[in-house]
């Protein structure tokens, strides 16, 4: 007869003969019955003690000693696989809370718990990676900025406490840059068609442009200064351009000197003093560049597109542009394009060169604003590297350039205006005579943020909406003609037609006018003007009587000279002047520097300008 059931072997389906539990090494896996699955999914009701406990849920009870003659309870039936003993479910009673992750959780809950844990681990890992990447990127950017800033060649140039600054409070927040292109024959520049040190020692300021950006970043104004502008050069420390250093030796002050000599004798410091005194602007940044640096930067941006109506041929540099029309030029060609000043077809020396420089910079600016450079990492990086390598600066670094670029992203090309300092011909030394009253009016308009010729801003500043009306032409005075022999006359070509001034001067001289000089006007003019200083009204009217359609214009910068500016409307006709003592009633133009009702000086009517949005050929 079978003996009483051994408690140690009661769950024979779960514990093998070796005493190991199911799932331990060495035991084959046993298929679960339907009853096992049912009991796992639906636990038996409380009190169902007739079922065996699952060893995995609770420890086995200790073996009981046999107690005769007390009989053991009968063994459960074992007939059929549906009647196999199912393990008793061990868990909380009905109604008790179940703790997540407790031994009694289901497989679905356990799987969900494992997934949540994996996502938590992945999330923490992602945060850690992002933090590490941010630290790395910041370190790389900081390292790049530091290495780039270290590449700038710093030079002493600025005079931030100068008493020549006009209305410093009104210029708060403005950014003003003095950009200088130097003419030096040393080093790499000697092989670029510029000549050698034997031709010209040292360095000169070949191109001088003063750039002003108002605090609201609504526009950009760039003013060009002729290299031969007549100046009073102050006493300055001697400058060694090759070493980029000043010496303790002082060069004495000089009157009637050329602008480019200020740089040659006193370097950036001396030039900044001259321009700051003439403009009244607070120059806060200085950028200097030589020929080779200019060429390198043009190549870095992939060239610049320009347009010309005729081939460009220079008497010294040779053929610069063999063909007319739109074309993209590289650095070497661009350098000759902006510095050629002996172009017979232009007939106006330095002013034709300044106009080309303004057109070139306009095209370069349009390319940058169209994202060809600013958003091309390769070109932008190359340009910055070339800029730092080939310039000498003060108060310029990578961060300030980036911030400036971002602040100008919303500026249209139409809000960028190039002006040229107006002059009144040349003196006996060949220096361009500055029209000081007109120059003062131009820079006062810049300081006051007044509108400029050709400017196209999106929103005009409030001050520009209340402009004073233009001054009316003054009444014509009753004058008497004087002898042409008493008139010292300067003839300037403002028509754009080559050779017109020389022809007109010859005709005027034939009538007895004393020809002082023949040259080119600062820009262009539609009308033919006869400009004069106060007290020379009769002399000017006498000249105008020989030029049909001429208009008289008073100015205070000519001294005892009367200037004829031949405009594009000039027909070429020069007639005999009225006889001495005849009554004259000339046509008068508004004064170029007459005060308006607002106290600001009126801008000269003949101011030469270029708008950066103009891409027409010229």
Image (spheres, rainbow, N blue to C red):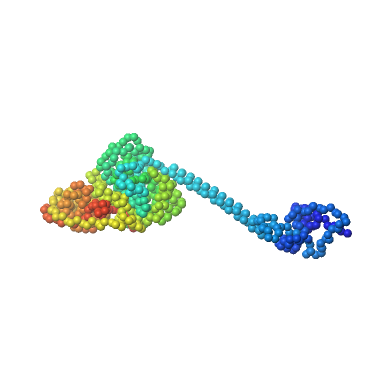
Q: Is residue 147 toward the left or the right of residue 555 in the image?
A: right
Q: Where's residue 561, x and y in %?
A: 19, 48
| Residue furthest to the left | 581
Task: Out of 47 and 356, give the one closest to the viewer.
Answer: 47
Please identify the quadrant where the N terminus is shown.
bottom right
- How many circles with numbers are drawn on the protein? 0
Q: Is residue 584 toward the left or the right of residue 179 in the image?
A: left
Residue drawn at x 19%, y 51% as measured from the top left = 506
Q: Where's residue 81, x and y in %?
A: 79, 64
Please identify the quadrant where the C terminus is shown.
bottom left
In the image, residue 482 above or below residue 157: below
Residue drawn at x 32%, y 35% as measured from the top left = 249
Quarter where residue 17 is shown: bottom right
Q: Where's residue 282, x and y in %?
A: 33, 46
Task: Out of 327 and 131, give the one closest to the viewer.
Answer: 131
Residue drawn at x 15%, y 55% as measured from the top left = 477
Task: Out of 159 and 510, give the one closest to the viewer.
Answer: 159
Q: Is residue 370 visible?
A: yes
Q: Is residue 345 visible?
A: no
Q: Where's residue 392, x and y in %?
A: 39, 43
| Residue furthest to the top | 248
């Amino acid at each position: 007869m079978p003996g009483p059931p051994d408690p140690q072997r009661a769950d024979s389906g779960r514990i093998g003969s070796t005493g190991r539990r199911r799932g331990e090494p060495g035991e084959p896996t046993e298929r679960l019955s339907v009853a096992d699955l049912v009991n796992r999914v639906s636990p038996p009701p409380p009190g169902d003690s007739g079922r065996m406990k699952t060893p995995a849920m609770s420890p086995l009870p200790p073996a009981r000693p046999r107690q005769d003659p007390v009989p053991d309870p009968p063994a459960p039936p074992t007939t059929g696989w549906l009647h196999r003993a199912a393990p008793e479910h061990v868990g909380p009673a009905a109604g008790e809370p179940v703790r997540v992750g407790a031994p009694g959780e289901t497989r679905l809950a356990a799987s969900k718990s494992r997934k949540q844990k994996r996502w938590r681990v992945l999330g923490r890992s992602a945060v850690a990676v992002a933090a590490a990447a941010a630290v790395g990127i910041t370190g790389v950017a900081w390292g790049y900025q530091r290495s780039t800033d270290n590449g700038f060649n710093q030079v002493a140039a600025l005079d931030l406490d100068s008493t020549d600054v006009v209305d410093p409070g009104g210029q708060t927040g403005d950014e003003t840059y003095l950009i200088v292109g130097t003419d030096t024959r040393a080093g790499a520049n000697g092989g670029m068609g510029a000549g050698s040190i034997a031709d010209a020692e040292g360095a000169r300021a070949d191109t001088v442009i003063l750039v002003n950006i108002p605090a609201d970043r609504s526009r950009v104004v760039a003013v060009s200064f002729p290299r031969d502008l007549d100046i009073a050069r102050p006493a300055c420390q001697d400058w060694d351009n090759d070493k980029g250093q000043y010496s303790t030796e002082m060069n004495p002050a000089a009157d009637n000197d050329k602008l480019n000599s200020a740089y040659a004798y006193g370097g950036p410091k001396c030039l900044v003093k001259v321009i700051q005194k003439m403009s009244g602007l607070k120059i806060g940044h200085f950028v200097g560049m030589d020929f080779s640096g200019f060429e390198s930067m043009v190549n870095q941006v992939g060239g610049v597109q320009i347009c010309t109506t005729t081939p460009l041929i220079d008497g010294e540099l040779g053929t610069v542009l063999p063909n007319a029309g739109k074309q993209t030029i590289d650095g070497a060609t661009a350098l000759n394009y902006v510095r050629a000043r002996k172009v017979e077809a232009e007939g106006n020396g330095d002013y034709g060169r300044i106009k080309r420089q303004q057109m070139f910079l306009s095209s370069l600016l349009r390319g940058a604003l169209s994202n060809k450079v600013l958003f091309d990492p390769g070109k932008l990086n190359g340009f910055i590297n070339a800029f730092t390598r080939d310039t000498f600066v003060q108060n310029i670094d990578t961060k300030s350039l980036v911030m400036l670029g971002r602040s100008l992203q919303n500026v249209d090309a139409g809000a960028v205006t190039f002006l040229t300092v107006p002059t009144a011909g040349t003196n006996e030394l060949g220096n361009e005579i500055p029209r000081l009253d007109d120059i003062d009016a131009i820079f006062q308009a810049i300081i006051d943020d007044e509108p400029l010729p050709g400017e196209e801003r999106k929103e005009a500043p409030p001050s520009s909406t209340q402009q004073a009306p233009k001054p009316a032409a003054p009444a014509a005075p009753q004058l008497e003609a004087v002898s042409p022999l008493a008139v010292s006359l300067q003839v300037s070509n403002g028509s754009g037609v080559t050779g017109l001034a020389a022809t007109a001067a010859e005709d005027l001289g034939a009538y007895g006018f004393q020809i002082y000089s023949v040259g080119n006007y600062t820009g262009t003019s539609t009308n033919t003007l006869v400009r004069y200083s106060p007290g020379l009204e009769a002399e000017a009217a006498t000249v105008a009587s020989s030029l049909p359609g001429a208009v008289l214009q008073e100015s205070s910068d000519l001294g005892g000279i009367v200037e004829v500016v031949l405009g594009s409307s000039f027909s070429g006709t020069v007639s005999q002047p009225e006889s001495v003592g005849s009554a004259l009633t000339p046509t008068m133009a508004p004064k170029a520097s007459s005060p308006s009702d607002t106290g600001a000086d009126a801008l000269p009517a003949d101011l030469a300008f270029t708008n950066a949005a103009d891409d027409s050929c010229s």
